[in-house]
């Protein structure tokens, strides 16, 4: 029987994959940056009769509709987003620690909660800290649901059951999936969690705002 999973070594700096552990990454040259990662076995021998294929259509036959945008409550943020949030879109909000990412995200949640429900998940702070920030910024709305968790599966379950229009992830580096054995913030965890959030957003037309950290080198932590 084929193995259920195999082991590779992923560079924590550039995300390069290696079949075995080596002291120095072949791609970026960083020393001692490889971490062991388990990936599930994928059967390459799938019979065509078991697969379904998409049928291409003519480009001119596609009906183009005006995309409705949701205002963030900030004219400058709306301008950066091209007019506001789009249903099913995933936005990554990056910045240095203490610059105001969480405050801006909470203000966006407060603005959108006037017409739709919002789910704010935090792995950075307690619910009391989040409530204090909302009080300081004069945000009062019963349409904002908050939860302190870092488990991706819990976030997706609550989002599916409550059906919010906007989901705030604060932050993607603290999120982890139980399907991955690596630690939160690692390359494999960030990639896996971000991928599942994107697929969830597209399949449910839920808008997702992810907060990301900036490293000391001035770049977004994790795979870009």
Image (cartoon, helix red, strand yellow):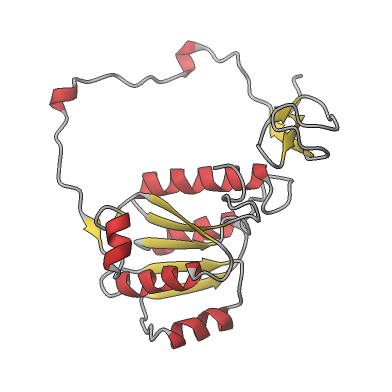
Q: In the rendering, at what x and y percent does residue 72 appear?
A: 31, 66
The answer to whether 40 appears left or right of 192 in the picture is right
Q: On the rendered image, what quadrant is the C terminus found in?
A: top right
Quarter-wise, where is residue 33 in the image?
top right
Q: Is residue 145 visible?
A: yes
Q: Is residue 66 above or below residue 112?
A: above
Q: Nearer the viewer, residue 18 or 100?
A: 100
Q: In the rendering, at what x and y percent does residue 75 appear?
A: 26, 66
Q: Is residue 163 visible?
A: no
Q: Residue at x 32, y 56 (%)?
A: 80
Q: Is residue 146 above or below residue 139?
A: above
Q: Is residue 28 above or below residue 104?
A: above
Q: Nearer the viewer, residue 155 or 220?
A: 220
Q: Residue at x 15, y 42 (%)?
A: 65
Q: In the rendering, at what x and y percent does residue 15 appear?
A: 66, 36
Q: Nearer the viewer, residue 4 or 12?
A: 12
Q: Residue at x 67, y 52 (%)?
A: 185
Quarter-wise, where is residue 173 in the image?
bottom right
The answer to whether 141 appears left or right of 122 in the picture is left
Q: On the rendered image, what quadrant is the N terminus found in?
A: top right
Q: In the rendering, at what x and y percent does residue 134 appear?
A: 45, 82
């Amino acid at each position: 029987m084929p193995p259920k999973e195999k082991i590779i070594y992923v560079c924590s700096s550039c995300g390069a994959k290696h079949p075995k552990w080596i002291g120095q990454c072949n791609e970026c040259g960083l020393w001692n940056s490889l971490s062991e990662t388990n990936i599930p076995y994928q059967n390459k021998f799938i019979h065509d009769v078991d697969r379904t294929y998409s049928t291409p259509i003519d480009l001119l036959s596609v009906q183009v509709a005006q995309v409705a945008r949701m205002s963030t409550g900030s004219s400058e943020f709306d301008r950066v987003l091209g007019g506001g949030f789009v249903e099913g879109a995933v936005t990554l909000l990056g910045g240095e620690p203490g610059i105001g990412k969480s405050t801006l995200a909470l203000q966006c949640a407060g603005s959108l909660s006037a017409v739709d429900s919002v789910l704010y998940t935090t792995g950075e702070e307690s619910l009391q800290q989040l409530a204090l920030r909302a009080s300081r910024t004069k945000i009062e709305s019963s349409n904002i649901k908050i939860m302190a968790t870092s488990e991706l599966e819990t976030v997706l379950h609550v989002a599916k059951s409550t059906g919010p229009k906007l989901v705030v992830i604060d932050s993607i580096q603290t999120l982890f999936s139980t399907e991955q054995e690596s630690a939160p913030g690692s390359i494999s965890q960030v990639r896996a969690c971000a991928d599942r959030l994107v697929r969830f957003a597209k399949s449910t037309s839920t808008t997702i705002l992810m907060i990301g950290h900036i490293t000391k080198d001035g770049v977004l932590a994790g795979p870009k």
